[in-house]
Each structure stands twice: as C-alpha cells, then as structure tokens.
Amino acid sequence: MNRELALELLGQLRDQEAAFFEHVVVRLLVKMGYGGSIEDAGKAVGRSGDGGIDGIIKQDRLGLDNVYVQAQRYAADRTVGGGDVRNLGGALQMRKATKGVLITTSSFTKDAIDTARQIGTIVLVDGEQLAQLMIKYDLGVATEATYDVKNVDQDFFDDWT
C-alpha cells in the first residue's frame, strides 16, 4: 500500500512546477526537525541565477550554520549524475558551507553516489526515499482511516489476586 502511495506522490511531484517542488523539499526538511524551532527555519530560494541552491535551512538563529538544498524534479527515467553533485559541492564551497542535501524525484548514478561520498558533506535523497519521508512526516498525504486492533490483555487476568 505504501509503495502505491509513494509512486502516486512521485507522479504528483513530477507534474508540479519546479518552484512547488523546491518548497515541498524545504517544508519536508523542516518537518523532519532541521532548523529546530527557529521561526522561518526554511526558505526556498530557487530561481534563475540561484547559484545551484534551491533552499536554505537555518540550523541556528543567526544563520551561522545552514543546510543548503538542491532539488531536482526529474522524470523517472532521467538520473542525477556526478556533475550535478559536483555543482552542488561547488555552490557549497562558494558559501563556505559544510552541509548540503540533493533531493530528486528520480535516482542517482553510481558516479553521483561516489562523488557525494568523496565530498563527504552532501547527502543524497532519491525519489523512493523522498516519497517514504513524505509519508512518514505527513507531507502531501492525508490519513483516510485508522483501525484499532484489540487483543486480550493477559496481564489483566494474570494479576488478579
């Protein structure tokens, strides 16, 4: 059931505009606890000439420690390559930043995974992980029904004295 929901979520994300996807990615990271309780912890900044950064998550109130986000809204058959990861690494270097996240609706090539590992400060989140995180953190999904399953409480009967 989660697999079908995840595929549907990814389809919806791919059908939206890039700006919408960038906002979703930032909202997800904030819901996951990045930025803590800081007001306005996350901001989507993606636009033409954004220097390869689509979002910023403030890790502290002064903005001294930020997580920089790149969002790649790709079709399922288009992969994110090592060049994309290197570009994010360069954008981090320009900002003297140490934390980056590259999130996509598709998947990563082996070169992209190896490059992220070599850089060491970039986390990759593929489409499958993205959809599962959205489900876990209730972003873009709604609970339709909840069921309580009852069992006999054996302790209730065993503790009678």
Image: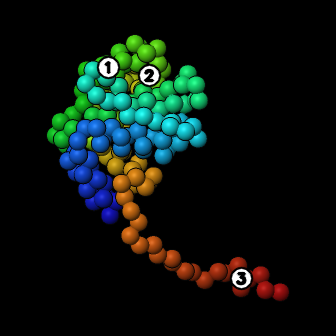
What type is the residue that disc 1 sits on?
A: Gly
Cα–Cα gap, marks 1 and 3: 63 Å
Q: Nearer the viewer, mark 2 or mark 1?
A: 1
Look at the numbered discs 2 and 1 and tell me whether their residues touch, using CB distance below 8 Å.
no
Mark 2 sits on what residue? 120
Residue at position x 39%, y 62% in the image? 142
Residue at the spot of label 1: 51
**Residue 156 numbered tag:** 3
Secondary element at tag 1: loop
Q: Of label 3 and label 2, which has the lower sequence position?
A: 2
Q: Secondary structure at mark 2?
A: loop
State the residue lying farthest toward the right. Answer: 161
Task: Tell me which residue sits at (41%, 14%) in the image.
Answer: 93
Q: Position of residue 81 (x, y in %)?
A: 24, 26
Q: Amino acid at mark 2?
A: Gly
The disc label shown at residue 18, or none: none
